[in-house]
Image (cartoon, grey):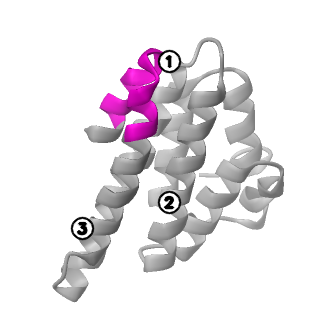
Amino acid sequence: MEREGGFCRAFLDFCDLNDGMQLYKLLDTTKSCKPTAKDKEASIQDEVTAAIVVAWCAGETSEGLEFALKAVKKWSTRYLERNAKVRWMLTPMLWLTARTRQLAMKLDAKSDCRRFRERVVEVSREVFTQLHRDKDRREGALVISC
């Protein structure tokens, strides 16, 4: 899907607009195509988009999973650090966490082990614990656990 300004620019624009649904739709486009040079532009401006783009480029590999998990951790940290209106961030968080589970399942199916799923559980527990400690962010903990 060709976007004016590329993936990273669109991602940052949707974040500025607090538009979680459009972010979800944008993230979903990463499953069906490879990133273009324009999609990769501006990724150095933001840790979350940088991790997403590296995961996207790496595809269904262990490296792709690790960077997808890094994106979940960075997005969750951003969610925790915001003081106001954060509910919009839950929809992209749901996509990011679901994607890590999908990748882990595919990778484990190829290798007949549970190593990748165990890695997702490890990171999910870490993020869940951080989110659950903050009673104003418990919706995020629910999203991580789904």
Q: Which residues are magenta?
A: 129-143
The residue positioned farthest toward the front in the image shown: 133
Residue appearing at x 41%, y 49% in the figure: 126
In percent of width and height, residue 75 lies at: 57, 41
Task: Specify which label sits upstream in the sequence, 2 or 3.
Answer: 2
The one of 40 and 89 positioned closer to us in this rendering: 89
Instruction: Give the residue at mark 2.
Output: 68
Residue appearing at x 65%, y 28% in the figure: 81
The one of 38 and 72 positioned closer to us in this rendering: 72
Task: Specify which label sits upstream in the sequence, 2 or 1.
Answer: 2
Q: Distance between the Cα atoms at labels 2 and 1?
A: 21 Å
Is 32 magenta? The answer is no
- Secondary structure mostly seen in magenta is helix
In percent of width and height, residue 85 lies at: 60, 12
What amino acid does circle 3 point to? Met
Rate crowding at label 2 as few (under 14), some (14 to 19) or many (20 or more) other CA atoms within 10 Å: many
Q: Distance between the Cα atoms at labels 2 and 3?
A: 14 Å
Residue 117: which disc? none
- Identify the image quadrant of residue 121: bottom left
Task: Specify which label sits upstream in the sequence, 3 or 1.
Answer: 1
Instruction: Report whether residue 33 is seen.
Output: no
What amino acid does circle 2 point to? Ala
Residue appearing at x 57%, y 30% in the figure: 79
